Amino acid sequence: MPNTFHVSLLTRDEVHSLTGEWGHEALRKILELADADDIGEIANDELEEICLMSLQDIGNQRAGEIVLEAVFGEGMRPGVRQNLVDDLQEDQPWNDFAEVSQQRGIFVAVCLLHKAFPTRYGTPDATRLTIRVQAETNAGLASIDPRQSAWLVRLLACGLSDDNIVHRLYGDELKKGEFTEASGLIWGAEIVEEPAEGALVWTMSIIASSQLFHSLTAGQQFKAFV
């Protein structure tokens, strides 16, 4: 038997980057792939600026290939990366990429490319939801697992209309069984507030593609059976 939850959508806003994705190590990788000189001598607070200038110097096409290589490494074949470069300039290109597990990485790539070439790449945007989840029972409270993407997608799907893309693409997976693609649908999740002693309420923040959850609105409330 699924557990019953009362979900309140507290906030819904746009984010244009994912925190921590372009840290010092990742930026040095870009410079290495771009054959920059004296990388080890660059101060951490100068890395992003020099990285962006290096990408601009090598041009949009090569920059796109390098950024994709830095993001995916051997997880994406060179031929796929080369074919994807031109598509990165389309509106929200991650939504059209068939491999769901790599859509988040494409978003991350466009975030850096937009900084280097703001007139070529649109501002990347994703949706961040802050939700309050109240369980009806202690058993329901114990079943809440924000680390499990499948659980989160199934929870949020209860607030979506039947014609939403999540229901249309993953109708069977939402009901039961394995839901391996869910890990590619949730781009970030964290606990904002854990339940106080004796309470049955969690508050959490979730980031995902805007295409999936754009119909959810701040102030919306719904029951979820997960």
Image: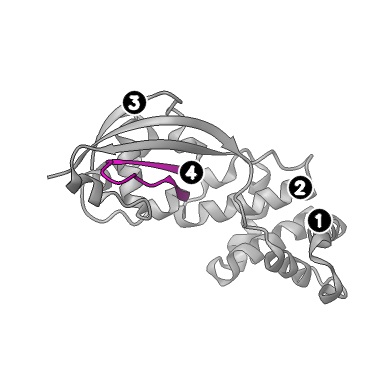
Question: Mark 4 — residue?
Answer: 208
Q: Give the amino acid type for the residue marked by disc 1 in the picture.
A: Leu
Coordinates of residue 20 in the picture (x, y in percent): 62, 57
Instruction: Look at the numbered disc 4 and give the secondary structure of its residue.
Output: strand
Q: Give the amino acid type for the residue marked by disc 2 in the picture.
A: Lys
The residue lying toward the viewer, choosing from 42 and 197, is 197
Q: Quadrant of residue 70?
A: bottom right
Q: Do callouts 1 and 4 mark residues in contact (Cβ within 8 Å)? A: no
Disc 3 or 1, which lies upstream in sequence?
Answer: 1
The furthest residue to the top? 219
Residue 221: mark in rendering? 3
Instruction: Look at the numbered disc 1 and give the secondary structure of its residue.
Output: helix
The furthest residue to the left? 1
Q: Is residue 152 above or below residue 28?
A: above
Residue 34 falls inside the magenta stretch: no
Question: Mark 2 — residue?
Answer: 115
The residue stretch that appears in magenta: 187-208
Q: Give the amino acid type for the residue marked by disc 4 in the picture.
A: Ala
Q: Is residue 172 left or right of residue 20?
A: left
Q: Quadrant of residue 204?
A: top left
Which residue is rendered at x = 76% and y = 47% of the image? 115
Which residue is rendered at x = 35% and y = 54% of the image? 148
Q: Do callouts 1 and 2 mark residues in contact (Cβ within 8 Å)? A: yes
Between the C-alphas of marks 4 and 2, the distance is 21 Å
Please count the marks in the image: 4
Between the C-alphas of marks 1 and 4, the distance is 26 Å
Disc 1 or 2, which lies upstream in sequence?
Answer: 1
Between the C-alphas of marks 3 and 1, the distance is 43 Å
Q: Is residue 161 above or below residue 97?
A: above
Q: Give the amino acid type for the residue marked by disc 3 in the picture.
A: Gln
Coordinates of residue 208 in the picture (x, y in percent): 48, 43
